[in-house]
Amino acid sequence: MSDKKEKQEIIVTGFGGQGIILAGRIIGMAAALRDDKESTLVQSYGPESRGGACCAQVVISNTIIQYPYITTPDILACMSQSAYEKYYRSLKPGGFLLTDKDLVIPQDDRLCFAIPATRMAEELGRKMMANIIMVGFTTAVTNLVTKEAALFAVTSSVPKGTEKMNTKAFNLGFDYGLSKLKGLEKRAGGQTGAKNEA
Amino acid sequence: MENYKIVLFLCNWGPHGAFQALQEDGYKIPGEIKMIRIPCTGRISKALLFKAFEMGADGVALAGCAPGACRYGSGTYNAIKNTEDTREIIEVLGLGRERLRLATFLPDDVDPLKEFLSDFVADIKALGKSPIVSATSKGDFPEESFTESGQELLAMAPATTAETIRKIIEKHDAYACQDCGKCTSSCPLALCGKDFSPRTLVGSLIAGEVDSENVKNNIWSCLTCGTCYERCPSEVNFPLLIQDLRSVLFKRKESHQTHGGFFHSLMRSMASPGLRQKRWKDLPSAIKTDPESKTLFYGGCAPYFDLFFRNHQQVKNANVLNDALRLLNFFDVTPRILENERCCGHDLLWSGDRQNFINIAKLNCDYLNSLGIEEMITACPECYKTFAQTYKENGIELNFKVTHLYEFLDTELERGAVTIENPDITFTYQDSCRLNSLEDVRDLPRKLIRRFSNGNFVEMQNNGSTALCCGNSAWIGCDAFSKALQVKRLTQGRNTQSDVMLTSCGKCRIHLGCAMEDPFSGDKLKMELVDLTSVIADHVRWE
């Protein structure tokens, strides 16, 4: 997908402390360091990054980026309700909306890719890895960066010694994303359960 | 010329008169026919009918009295049912139902009997020889295919029994018994009041009392459920000890088979290399399979159980296989299935017939290894344990991975984006002894149940490592205590106030379902038994 469109704009948003900025950084790094593209990151400073609605704006492009701020994103990843409510109207038509299933209640019926990232991270034993799960999920669903690039960016951004755990978290999110796409395809084909045979 | 063998079971009353009249007329009975005079066709059970095929018969005819003319009232009616069931079973087995026939004659029906006999002989000759190789004429496989202890067991002559028993005790280190009695006090069978004690049994064996009636009965009574092994502080693997002891007793032609030994005959027959079964003939067309797939689905003997017990409630195990296949399809796996799938040999081994277990295991190993598959998925706890563990223990190596369906489902559901809708009823779960004995899979059923039960899951009083057995294993030793155990288990299930008892094993459903047919207290025991696989197949959804 990244080849089709010259420029992609992504907003990752949620509470400060969820690792929103790091998630944005990883996606940008993956594009710039491994996928041979340009990328920029604008991140919230001040009170937001310490608990309020925090936001990372990432632009990925095949050519030089002239302006790093985003008003209408192609991809919006929300990890809190307040962040969702602040940004969801700005998403481009046909853009991807990704949410944390347990933390965000959608306000309209637009197609929403939801993953219980925080719950999955808790089950994994590290709640703080919800952001990495979200990165994996975003990678699988949007095809924004390649899996290899994203994994490289994950392992080189996280603290030493946690690479293995973070790779696992990334793969959890990635597999969930693939499974989600498969499910959508199946539903579109009229198959919802194992027994509704045409 | 081929030497055909046809067994004619001839009722003493109506047809025998006709048969005698034929002989008196000077009619030469075809040489292929071996006549066996019986008191009534109703007494020829499915096991006896099939036994003839197991022993090498090419055709079996049952000649009885016309309905209404039966000396004992219901004999012909029973014969009709037994014949029908057995005919369907030998059809699936690939012999062809035409090899078994029931006909009725009055004493005057001389010509019809003559015609019947000559027609039957001609038909059997047209069908050719039976593909079943009788167990007695089967050549032994080369000795190197056995493990050391297996070879010893097979080579043993009755005279050296005491020595072999000593070796078995040594092998399982039963000398380490501390006489603490934890085994007996946790044994579900002993707790039902049966005169059975693992502790006493081990003590008596060490004392060299293998020939006492009590010891022998105890060896056959054990359910091999493994609760004692779980508890034993010296880690004596009592189930495997029993398995070896049974091979010794079996060599001396002692066994306690249920259902007339039908299932053991069936499984031994499956050790015939020339057999071409039709296991999947009733597969719904909506299920997708692929003969080139690297993933094999192994169904197990459910289709045979269904046919054998088809006049009993609740036994529809083949549906579970279909549900398992639907689930595989749901997750985009199009598996290979084998029409000529053989029994894994579990029941033969656990009932002491080690020789035929090895025969069937060798056949399976050669065949399955030649398919070029990477993974076998099965929903049968016994197939899983036998292929994944027992084959290796007996020196038979498979070149693919063996997976239980629950492992597959767990991995797939873990990926997410799939939900199992809450069926909105309450559940309890009957453990499978074979899954409980394997550490990799013992927690999986509950993990799967918790994915959809949403708090509607209630454990029975005995669960997990203390779970109660369904009452029988390996089709041996069914008695009043088996029933008592089943009643106890079902009562525990009813006490949870659950709507449904989930199971993982078809035999649990057969045995617990049998107890529910009790004419006096059946209503107090009735409970819906549903396989976990079917519940998941019914309620799994893409999000």
Image (cartoon, grey):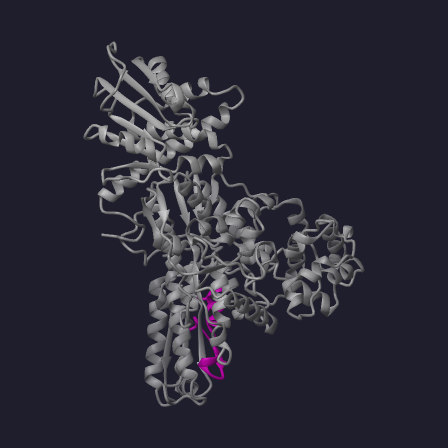
Q: Is residue A191 left or right of residue B518?
A: left
Q: Which residues are magenta?
A: B29-57
Q: Nearer the viewer, residue B496 or B377?
A: B496
In the rendered view of the protein, which quadrant contains the C terminus of chain B? top left
Which residue is located at x 24 percent, y 25 percent?
A74
Q: Is residue A68 above or below residue B185?
A: above
The residue at the far front in this view is A47
Q: Nearer the viewer, residue B442 or A76?
A: A76
Asked whether the viewer can see residue B274, the reply is: no
Q: Nearer the viewer, residue B516 or A174?
A: A174
Q: Is residue B387 left or right of residue B335?
A: right
**For residue B56: magenta?**
yes
Which residue is located at x 42 percent, y 62 percent?
B304
Q: Is residue B284 left or right of residue B267?
A: left
Residue B211 position, x and y percent, is 74, 65
**For residue B25: magenta?**
no
Q: Is residue B109 above or below residue B374?
A: below
Q: Nearer the viewer, residue B126 or A28?
A: A28
Q: Is residue B239 above or below residue B80?
A: above
In the rendered view of the protein, which quadrant contains the N terminus of chain B? bottom left
Q: How many marks?
A: 0
Asked whether the viewer can see residue B318, the reply is: yes
Residue B441 position, x and y percent, is 52, 47
Residue B88 position, x and y percent, is 37, 66
The residue at the far left in this view is A93
Residue B377 position, x and y percent, is 43, 46
Q: Is residue A46 above or below residue A81?
A: above
Task: State which quadrant residue A51 falls in.
Answer: top left
